[in-house]
């Protein structure tokens, strides 16, 4: 009788470890005054393997390198600064896990309260996660036009930034990654 064991594994420890590739994450942001970048950095502290890009630096060809897209922009005059990116990549993003976060003033008193969200095409927004995060306004740092616009809307100093607001985003990514590891 043969005593040779089936040689399916090289018995070195490394080869016996099951290696699971987690779905890769791209964090893409646009910021004018830094608050959206701050949220993006807080998120990236939780996922040290994630790649962080300013929306301008993201090369279209890189879209297929990622499964999870966390896309952050600020709300300006009722539109989202990442709207162009989202619309441009709508087709590719359909097959991705997408969480859009929008910094802004909460509650925004203007008539344009929901406009930024509603400007995302229906077929895109029905398949993505979306959250509005309280941002920051420091009138001394705003350019003249921005300062005028906000003062006309009765907005002065505002800062409600808090790391805890990213929790739904973190939970979402963990749930996607957990599903993947259980497959
Ligand atoms: C010109 C201007 C327009 C803004 N319009 C809106 C708005 O429509 N809705 C809103 O919730 N916040 C609005 N904000 C607040 C910004 O979204 C908020 O300050 C955000 O934190 C800025 O992000 P950033 O620091 O990444 O540029 C506006 C701010 C500026 C300067």
Image: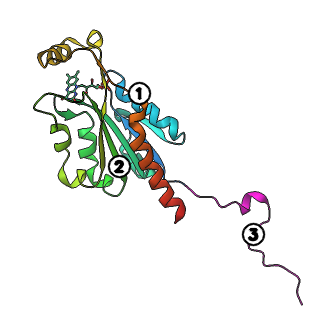
Q: Using residue 90 as the reference point, say whether residue 59 is left or right of it.
A: right
- Proximity of marks 3 and 2: CB atoms separated by less than 8 Å: no
Please give the label number shown on residue 9. Answer: 3
Rendering quarter of residue 88: top left
The location of residue 73, given as percent across then percent down, is 30, 33
Determine crowd level at label 1: few under 14, some 14-19, many 20+ residues with C-alpha closer than 10 A.
some
Ligand 1 image-quadrant field: top left
Compared to residue 36, the image places residue 118 above or below, namely below
Q: Nearer the viewer, mark 3 or mark 2?
A: 2
Question: Which is more N-terminal, label 1 or label 2?
Answer: 1
Q: CA distance from mark 3 to mark 2?
A: 38 Å
Residue positioned 19% across, 34% down in the render: 79
Compared to residue 140, the image places residue 20 above or below, namely below
Residue at the extreme top = 140
Nearest the camera: 161 or 128?
161
Q: CA distance from mark 1 to mark 3?
A: 46 Å
The location of residue 66, given as percent across then percent down, is 44, 50
Q: CA distance from mark 2 to mark 1?
A: 19 Å
Residue positioned 24% across, 13% down in the render: 143
Numbered-mark total: 3
Residue at the extreme bottom = 1
- Element class at badge 1: helix
Kindly report the secondary structure that dominates the magenta region of the rendered protein: loop
Please give the label number shown on residue 38. Answer: 1
> Which residue is labeled 2 in the image?
98
């Amino acid at each position: 009788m043969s005593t040779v064991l089936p040689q399916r594994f090289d018995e070195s420890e490394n080869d016996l470890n099951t290696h699971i590739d987690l779905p890769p994450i791209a964090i893409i942001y646009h910021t004018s005054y830094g608050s959206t970048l701050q949220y993006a950095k807080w998120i990236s502290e939780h996922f040290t393997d994630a790649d962080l890009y300013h929306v301008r630096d993201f090369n279209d060809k890189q879209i297929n390198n990622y499964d999870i897209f966390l896309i952050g922009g600020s709300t300006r005059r009722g539109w989202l600064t990442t709207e162009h990116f989202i619309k441009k990549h709508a087709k590719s993003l359909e097959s991705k896990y997408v969480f859009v976060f929008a910094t802004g003033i909460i509650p925004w008193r203007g008539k344009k309260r929901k406009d930024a969200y509603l400007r995302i095409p229906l077929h895109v927004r029905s398949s993505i996660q979306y959250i509005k995060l309280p941002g920051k306004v420091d009138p001394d740092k705003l350019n003249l036009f921005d300062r005028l616009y906000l003062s006309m809307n009765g907005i002065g100093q505002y800062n409600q930034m808090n790391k805890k607001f990213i929790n739904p985003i973190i939970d979402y990514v963990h749930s996607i990654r957990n599903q993947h590891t259980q497959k």
